[in-house]
Image: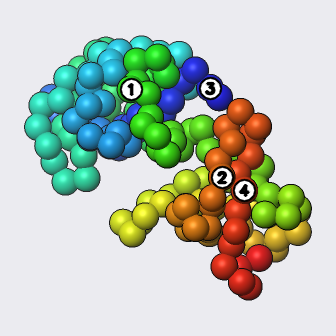
């Protein structure tokens, strides 16, 4: 598990006065400002001040960003917070970052693949699984029925997929 967790991304500039469009990946979207200063992959640090909600995120001021051009240059940059600043997940809740990369085995112990991504399209989380025996990635509902066991310490999840999925 990484000591940094992705909490948002910059979607470009907002207006001409140095604000940026900020997408939050937090359960409570406005909480992203509570975890500041945030860092990017290059190690640059940014203070965060949310100025107002906008469609698909927030308008925000980031420390060190004063112009529209600087905001545009940061489009697509992911922002990270140290894990120790984030609240501990409740029972049966997991940070997506902790699930990505885990091995997926079926209830008989046969390895199926690894978790490539965790997606939420509104009806619940889906695990995107890739593996050597799979031509394409497979989406597995992340429910207690389909994934009865998550073993973070063991680096795996046990899956009981619907018939015909794999």
- Residue position marked by numbered label 1 in the rendering: 87
59 left or right of 72? left
Residue 78 in the image: state x and y as whole percent. Answer: 47, 35
> Is there CB contact under 8 Å for labels 4 and 2?
yes
Observer able to see residue 65: no
Q: Is residue 125 above or below residue 9?
A: below
- Residue position marked by numbered label 3 in the rendering: 2
Residue at 77%, 49% in the rendered image = 103
Q: Residues within 10 Å of mark 4 (few under 14, many from 20)?
A: many
Q: Which mark is residue 38?
A: none
Spatial separation of the CA atoms under disc 3 and disc 2: 21 Å
Residue at 77%, 76% in the rendered image = 166
Q: Residue furthest left?
A: 52
Residue 27 in the image: state x and y as whole percent. Answer: 33, 43
Spatial separation of the CA atoms under disc 1 and disc 3: 15 Å
> Which is more foreground, mark 1 or mark 4?
4
- Residue position marked by numbered label 4 in the rendering: 158
């Amino acid at each position: 598990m990484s000591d940094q967790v992705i909490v948002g991304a910059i979607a470009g500039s907002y207006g001409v006065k140095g604000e940026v469009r900020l997408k939050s990946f937090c359960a409570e979207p406005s909480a992203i400002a509570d975890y500041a200063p945030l860092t990017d992959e290059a190690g640059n640090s940014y203070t965060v001040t949310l100025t107002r909600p906008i469609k698909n995120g927030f308008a925000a001021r980031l420390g060190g960003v004063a112009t529209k051009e600087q905001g545009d240059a940061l489009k697509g940059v992911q922002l990270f917070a140290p894990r120790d600043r984030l609240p501990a997940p409740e029972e049966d809740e997991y940070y997506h970052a902790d699930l990505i990369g885990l091995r997926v085995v079926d209830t008989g112990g046969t390895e199926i693949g690894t978790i490539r991504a965790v997606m939420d399209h509104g009806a619940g989380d889906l695990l995107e699984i890739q593996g050597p025996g799979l031509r394409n990635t497979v989406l597995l509902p992340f429910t207690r029925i389909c994934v009865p066991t998550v073993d973070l310490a063991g680096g795996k999840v046990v899956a009981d997929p619907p018939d015909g999925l794999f």
